[in-house]
């Protein structure tokens, strides 16, 4: 059973920063797209950022471009989401997800992901 374990969530003021981590010890990142999604109360789970395969190409949702950065440490089997200039609308449960690469798919769609973490809460206070 593949486990993704998120950490790093918490309470932060508007304009502050947080770094989320996702440990995935069983995965070889070159074979996966690793993504962050988030879900606010009463809303659907939405795509945030993804880092893909061997080349590590990244793609971000428009709502976080220029503020959030996804990265990974292959040696530590960990994916990160650096979140800067946080806004109240960024408050949500953030989930790490893994999609095993097997042809062309839309990596922004949550239905294409094979494994999910349990989520970590991010609260932004104004």
Image (tube, rainbow, N blue to C red):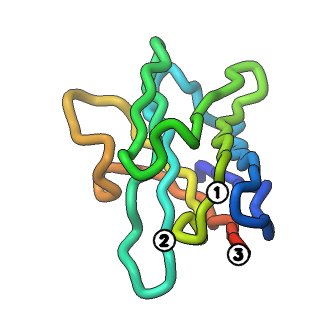
Residue name at image x 60 percent, y 59 percent = 117
Residue name at image x 79 percent, y 70 percent = 11
Q: Relative to 6, does residue 52 appear above or below in the rendering?
A: above
- Please name the residue that numbered disc 3 is placed on: 126
Q: Relative to 100, does residue 43 appear above or below in the rendering?
A: below
What mark, if any, has residue 99 been given in the picture? Answer: none
- x, y percent for residue 125: 73, 75
Q: Kindly state the secondary structure of the residue where label 3 is placed.
A: loop
Say which of 84 and 60 sits in front: 84
Callout 3 touching callout 2 (CB < 8 Å): no
Q: Is residue 69 visible?
A: yes
Of badges 1 and 3, nearer the viewer stands 3
Of badges 1 and 2, nearer the viewer stands 1
The image quadrant that residue 28 belongs to is: top right
| C-alpha distance separating marks 1 and 3 | 10 Å
| C-alpha distance separating marks 3 and 2 | 19 Å
Q: Earlier in the sequence, mark 1 or mark 3?
A: 1
- x, y percent for residue 123: 70, 72
- Please name the residue that numbered disc 2 is placed on: 39
Of badges 3 and 2, nearer the viewer stands 3
- Please name the residue that numbered disc 1 is placed on: 86
Q: Kindly state the secondary structure of the residue where label 2 is placed.
A: strand
């Amino acid at each position: 059973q593949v486990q993704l374990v998120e950490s790093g969530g918490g309470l932060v003021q508007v304009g502050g920063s947080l770094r989320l981590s996702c440990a995935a010890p069983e995965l070889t990142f070159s074979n996966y797209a690793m993504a962050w999604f988030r879900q606010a109360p009463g809303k659907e789970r939405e795509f945030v950022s993804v880092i893909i395969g061997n080349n590590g190409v990244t793609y971000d949702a428009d709502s976080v471009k220029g503020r959030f950065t996804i990265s990974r440490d292959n040696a530590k089997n960990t994916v990160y989401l650096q979140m800067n200039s946080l806004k109240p609308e960024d408050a949500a449960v953030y989930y790490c997800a893994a999609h095993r690469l097997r042809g062309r798919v839309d990596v922004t769609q949550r239905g294409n992901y094979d494994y999910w973490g349990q989520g970590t809460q991010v609260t932004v206070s104004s």
